Amino acid sequence: MNEQAFRNEVREFLKANFPEKWRFPAHRLSLKETHDWQLKLHEKGWAAPSWPKEYGGMGLSPYEQLVFQEEFDNYGVNSAPNMGITMLGHLLIRYGTEEQKAFYLPKILSCEIRWCQGYSEPGAGSDLAGLRTAAVLDGDHFVVNGQKIWTSYAHDADMIFLLVRTNKDVKKQEGISFLLADMKLPGITIKKIKNLTGNSEFCEVFFDNVKVPKENIVGEINQGWTMAKSLLGAERITIGAPKIARFPLKLVKQMAIDNGLFDDPVFRARYTKLTLDVDDLDAAFIRFAEVLRRGDELGPEVSMLKIWITEAAQRVTDMLVEVGGEASVLDAPVSLSDGGSVHPANQSFSSRPASIYGGTNEIQRNILAKAVLQLPG
């Protein structure tokens, strides 16, 4: 299928199936809220654009994935990232047992199981290898104790994939394992964290003698760091997706048109510069996506994507607030002439933590300096 035919098919599907009331929402819609939409994607066979076809995915090339996502962004589809699709699925396909793949992958595609990610801890964010949540093998179970933080949508999740320390007597990277746990297990407590927008996407998750079946380990015991790095690479390329800046950039243009600013040459020059920043990111993103597509590991240079897109997104939302004028100080969405709406303040607030989560941009620059440029530590 040629590109235009594919775009037309995506547009027609969105027009026929995506609820009008959810277009260009003031905040990200959760997977729980959009469950019926996720089912429609699954029924169409479009739930997992990047998965291989043999596992129920679309098998799209990196460029086709960009085209696919671009049409979603243009239509105003803005829902929470499906971590089972974007992160865990790829890891299970590569490292999971046949039993794990047969059980979990279909349930990820159908959204029967919603997942959250248990990585960061109060003392182990950017230095993830310093995590202290412990798992002790006791017969047929791992007994887990500890705490995770900034766990997106934990309150809506059915299961969590998490990193745990299974050996304290070796180099910290060598004593980590990768577990899958049911969020309804006794001993798990979830506390929501309210952010500046008034929403509670993030949570704290506490583990108090939680018994996780030993067959829920992915890969070998104490060998989870390799998978952790693989998943971090996938996370950074997900965070580095152009849509994070492309979506608010579209809102900037529409609001500027509505406010009579778009024909101003000074504004257009600034807007064009931001557009070129995002266009350049597309080319870099395709290169890294192709690495994953080949089944290879992403190198440390993927940190560049995370820095580039999060800082570009902040520049875009700064412009959005500027273009919004007095509307940007109100805690209310602004209607746009194309039928959409925008909450300038919330867009700005939401872009701020992006340069912190997934590993702070300062840490990403250190990674590039040491591992790519070979500068001294």
Image: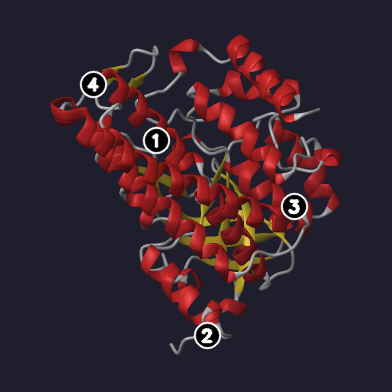
Q: Is residue 189 in view?
A: yes
Residue at disc 1, secondary structure: helix
Q: CA distance from mark 4 to mark 2?
A: 48 Å
Find numbered disc 3 in the image and state the secondary structure of the residue it sits on: helix
> How many residues crowd around disc 4 within 10 Å: few (fewer than 14), some, or many (20 or more)?
few
Viewer-closest of 166 and 39:
39
187 lies above or below 223 = above
**Amino acid type shown at disc 4:** Asn
- Decide: marks 3, 2 in contact (CB < 8 A)? no
Q: Earlier in the sequence, mark 4 or mark 2?
A: 4
Residue bearing the label numbered 1: 249
* Percent of width and height locating residue 9: 70, 19
**Gap between marks 4 and 1, in whole Å?**
15 Å
Frontmost of labels 2 and 1 is: 1
Q: Which residue is mark 4?
A: 259
CB contact under 8 Å: marks 4 and 2: no
